[in-house]
Image (cartoon, rainbow, N blue to C red):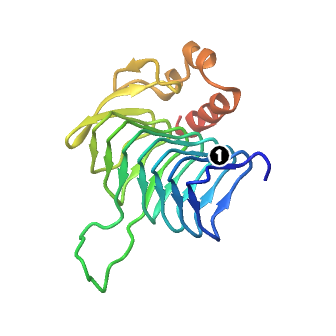
């Protein structure tokens, strides 16, 4: 497609599917069966494994490793050097190894250098702090930080307002969100919050 860009140094293997407007930058690798939605950006030196799905508008920054079994929703941000795992009991030569799935829901943001243990779900519009070690599910619209990552606060849809954990879902779409979010992401947040109410 004329509006899809793949840098000459990138390696997009046969069988990978790139939506309209995708960008795959320097030295990135996208494996067979990976599916990138429209306007996905894959940063320099990143790796997208076999069968990984990444939803529309998501941005994967530099040096991110996304292994088989990971599903990333639409309009997600994955910061530099984030690592996803897919094996809870890794041993070289293990004949019974099975991929353990990880899901990152729509609108979630993962800070630089975070490690995401397989088998968890990162909820919609959740925010994971830089360098966090995430070992359990992250609820929607929740900020987690630390080693291991723990719930700290609720975060509004645009990520600009930090609120107490007991904040009601109806308070998470605020004036700052209307000002800071695109129409598409604002509507996605509104629909998501309605389903949580």
Residue 94 versus residue 106 in the image, above or below: below
Disc 1 crowd rating (10 Å Cα; few below 14, some 14-19, many 20+) is many
Provide the secondary structure element on which disc 1 rests: loop
Instruction: Using residue 19 as the reference point, say whether residue 103 is left or right of it.
Output: left
Of the pair 196 and 21, the residue shown nearer to us: 21
Instruction: Using residue 193 as the reference point, say whether residue 145 is left or right of it.
Output: left
The residue drawn where x is 33% and y is 33% is: 129
Tell me where residue 31 appears, x and y as whole percent: 54, 66
The residue drawn where x is 40% and y is 24% is: 167
The residue drawn where x is 42% and y is 26% is: 155
Tell me where residue 70 appears, x and y as whole percent: 46, 59
Residue 54 versus residue 125 in the image, above or below: below
Which of the 4 image quadrants contains residue 98?
bottom left
Tell me where residue 145 appears, x and y as whole percent: 27, 34
Residue 183 versus residue 120 in the image, above or below: above
The residue drawn where x is 45% and y is 50% is: 45
Q: Which residue is mark 1?
A: 56
Of the pair 164 and 70, the residue shown nearer to us: 70
């Amino acid at each position: 497609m004329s509006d899809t860009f793949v840098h000459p140094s990138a390696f997009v293997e046969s069988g990978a599917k790139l939506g309209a407007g995708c960008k795959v930058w320097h030295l990135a690798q996208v494996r067979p069966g990976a599916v990138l939605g429209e306007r996905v950006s894959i940063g320099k030196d990143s790796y997208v494994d076999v069968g990984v799905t990444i939803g529309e508008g998501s941005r994967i920054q530099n040096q991110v490793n996304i292994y088989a079994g990971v599903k990333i929703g639409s309009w997600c941000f994955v910061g530099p050097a984030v690592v996803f795992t897919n094996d809870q009991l890794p041993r070289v030569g293990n004949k019974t190894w099975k991929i353990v799935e990880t899901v990152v829901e729509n609108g979630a943001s993962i800070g630089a250098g975070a490690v995401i243990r397989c088998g968890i779900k990162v909820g919609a519009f959740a925010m994971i702090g830089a360098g966090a070690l995430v070992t359990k599910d992250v609820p929607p619209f929740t900020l987690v930080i630390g080693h291991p990552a723990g719930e700290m606060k609720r975060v509004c849809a645009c990520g600009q307002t930090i609120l107490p954990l007991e904040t009601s879902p109806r308070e998470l779409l605020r004036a700052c969100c209307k000002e800071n979010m695109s129409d598409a992401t604002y509507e996605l947040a509104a629909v998501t919050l309605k389903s949580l109410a």
